[in-house]
Image (tube, rainbow, N blue to C red):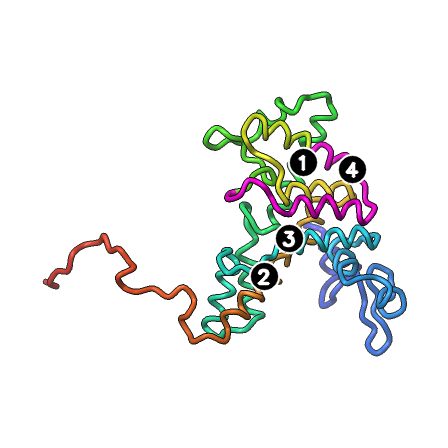
């Protein structure tokens, strides 16, 4: 007979080791008092990172991560997750429904910021371990998956414009916030230089941010949790833009826009 003591202790009980609301008194979060130690003393991003990872990071680290999130949520309804939010506004749904749908649609291996961060951080962790074993970058890249003759490494490519406009402010704000470039970021740029010379690929926003998070001691799971809602701001903006307009104003289509290649009209026997 299997031991059920673990579940027996939790029978009809909610066990929580991360925080505790004491109605009318206080809230504890990872051992900190929300009302006396956190409110007014740390930023919301610091609080979010604390809830997402269990770590209370320094303000300058949280401020840089906030800058990163600013670069992941553009108010442009052409972006896939924002299209969904705009459609929600177009159909007079709620902004909460629009945001939730946009976040789910951006939980992708190809773009979005959350799952891509997990993938990139996981790869950089393993690749850097190999690099420290005196293996050259070329040998490490050879082990990656390839498509159309190029390695598929999340964080080191961009589908439209090769130059990522976010890298310059990321670097500038590292200096402004008195943050140093760590070993993972140094390795990421070494990897980028090789990919650029060999395959015309280079580091993008995700690669830079993933290396930064690793340098701060975060795990890939931490990175995923921190970035969970990173597209929400642009999604709400796209929702707001579409909401006041008449229904079916967003990307309306005519029957003539559809090219039908099926069977021709026929009589029912």
Question: Where does the image place residue 158, in percent across and percent down from the top left?
Answer: 55, 42
Q: Position of residue 70 (x, y in %)?
A: 66, 56
Q: Is residue 97 above or below residue 132?
A: below
Which residue is found at the position 40% from the left and 71% from the top? Answer: 248
Vertically, is 34 above or below 5?
Answer: below
Coordinates of residue 245 in the picture (x, y in percent):
46, 74
Find disc 2 in the rendering and name its residue. 234
- Circle 4 sits on which residue? 182
Locate residue 235 relative to residue 211 in the image: left or right. Answer: left
Q: Nearer the viewer, residue 127 or 248?
A: 248
Distance in Å between CA atoms under marks 4 and 1: 13 Å
Residues shaded magenta: 159-187
Q: Are marks 4 and 1 in contact (CB under 8 Å)?
A: no
Label disc, if present, on residue 71 of the rendered structure: 3
Secondary structure at badge 1 equals: helix
Q: Earlier in the sequence, mark 4 or mark 1?
A: 1
- Measured in 3D between alpha carbons, the distance from the residue under mark 3 to the one under mark 4, in whole angstroms, is 21 Å
Residue 124 tag number: 1
Work out whether mark 2 precedes mark 1 in sequence or the reverse, and give the earlier one. 1
Q: In which quarter of the view is residue 211 placed?
A: top right
Q: Using the rendered view, name the quadrant where residue 97 is placed.
A: bottom right
**Considering depth in this image, is 22 or 67 the residue closer to the camera?**
67
Residue at figure coordinates x 53%, y 59% from the top left: 76
């Amino acid at each position: 007979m299997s031991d059920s003591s673990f579940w027996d202790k939790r029978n009809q009980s909610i066990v929580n080791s991360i925080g505790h609301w004491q109605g009318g008194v206080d809230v504890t979060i990872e051992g900190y008092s929300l009302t006396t130690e956190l409110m007014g003393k740390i930023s919301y991003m610091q609080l979010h990172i604390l809830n997402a990872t269990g770590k209370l990071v320094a303000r300058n680290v949280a401020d840089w991560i906030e800058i990163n999130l600013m670069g992941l949520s553009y108010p442009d309804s052409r972006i896939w997750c924002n299209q969904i939010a705009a459609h929600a506004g177009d159909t007079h749904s709620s902004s909460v429904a629009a945001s939730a749908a946009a976040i789910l649609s951006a939980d992708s291996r190809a773009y979005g910021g959350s799952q891509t961060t997990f993938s990139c951080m996981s790869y950089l962790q393993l690749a850097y371990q190999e690099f420290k074993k005196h293996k050259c970058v070329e040998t490490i890249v050879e082990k990656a998956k390839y498509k159309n003759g190029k390695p598929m490494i999340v964080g080191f490519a961009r589908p439209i414009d090769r130059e990522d406009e976010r890298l310059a402010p990321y670097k500038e704000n590292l200096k402004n916030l008195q943050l140093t470039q760590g070993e993972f970021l140094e390795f990421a740029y070494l990897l980028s230089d090789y990919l650029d010379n060999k395959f015309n690929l280079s580091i993008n926003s995700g690669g830079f941010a993933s290396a930064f998070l690793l340098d701060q001691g975060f795990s890939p799971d931490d990175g995923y949790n921190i970035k969970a809602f990173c597209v929400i701001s642009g999604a709400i903006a796209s929702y707001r833009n579409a909401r006041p307009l008449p229904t079916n104003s967003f990307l309306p289509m005519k029957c003539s826009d559809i090219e039908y290649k099926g069977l021709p009209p026929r009589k029912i026997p």
